[in-house]
Image (cartoon, rainbow, N blue to C red):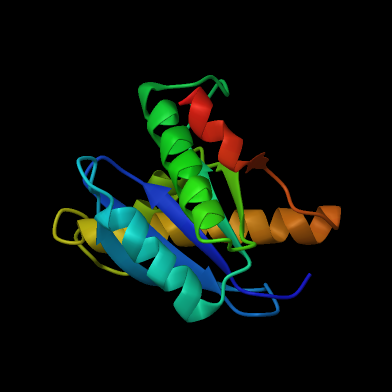
């Protein structure tokens, strides 16, 4: 498969966004979007980014605990992925949305930033983007090894479940 993917780290306050190259080898940070749980400005911004980069799929990080069990943040990520899939379907865009295990992505991102000398408290938006890079890079690497898309595909009908 060839084409750009976006990676998304959904938080309560911010959403980190990353993108990859068209050959799907390297994820890079893109931007941090303000989370909008009351309206849909966050979904609208992601739709703009999907169009701008002609993304063929979106990888949303699925927060699980270290035992692989759901956490309170899991439902938020699942709901966000379903909302995004629904918005894409309403606009008749053929873009896959999938959830991929994101265990330790934020910790990994913080460690990488610390190693470069950045203060994590002053770099929260950057950490969100770095976490999105970790999530997307993991998905790209897994896709490459397996020869198919990994993760849980979210269909627009999933909106009824959330």
Residue 65 position, x and y percent, is 48, 25
Residue 158 position, x and y percent, is 56, 33
Q: Is residue 28 visible?
A: no
- Residue 8, image quadrant: bottom left
- Residue 72, image quadrant: top left
Q: Residue at x 54, y 19 (%)?
A: 69
Q: Residue at x 82, y 55 (%)?
A: 148
Looking at the image, residue 92 lies above or below residue 31: above
Q: Residue at x 37, y 29 (%)?
A: 73
Quadrant location of the N terminus?
Answer: bottom right
19 vs 10, left or right, is right
Q: Residue at x 33, y 64 (%)?
A: 45
Looking at the image, residue 152 lies above or below residue 89: above
Looking at the image, residue 157 lies above or below residue 16: above
49 vs 119, left or right, is right
Residue 28 position, x and y percent, is 48, 73
Front in this rendered view, residue 32 or 128: 32
Front in this rendered view, residue 52 or 59: 52
51 vs 56, left or right, is left
């Amino acid at each position: 498969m060839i084409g750009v993917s976006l990676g998304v780290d959904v938080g309560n306050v911010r959403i980190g966004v990353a993108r990859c190259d068209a050959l799907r080898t390297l994820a890079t940070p893109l931007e941090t979007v303000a989370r909008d749980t009351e309206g849909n400005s966050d979904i609208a911004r992601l739709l703009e980014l999907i169009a701008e980069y002609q993304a063929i799929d979106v990888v949303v990080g699925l927060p699980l605990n270290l035992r692989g069990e759901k956490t309170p943040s899991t439902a938020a990520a699942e709901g966000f992925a379903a909302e995004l899939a629904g918005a894409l379907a309403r606009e008749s865009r053929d873009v896959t949305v999938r959830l991929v295990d994101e265990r330790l992505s934020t910790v990994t991102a913080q460690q990488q930033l610390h190693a470069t000398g950045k203060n994590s408290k002053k770099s929260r938006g950057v950490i969100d983007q770095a976490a999105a890079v970790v999530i997307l890079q993991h998905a790209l690497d897994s896709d490459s090894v397996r020869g198919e898309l990994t993760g849980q595909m979210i269909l627009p009908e999933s909106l009824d479940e959330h």
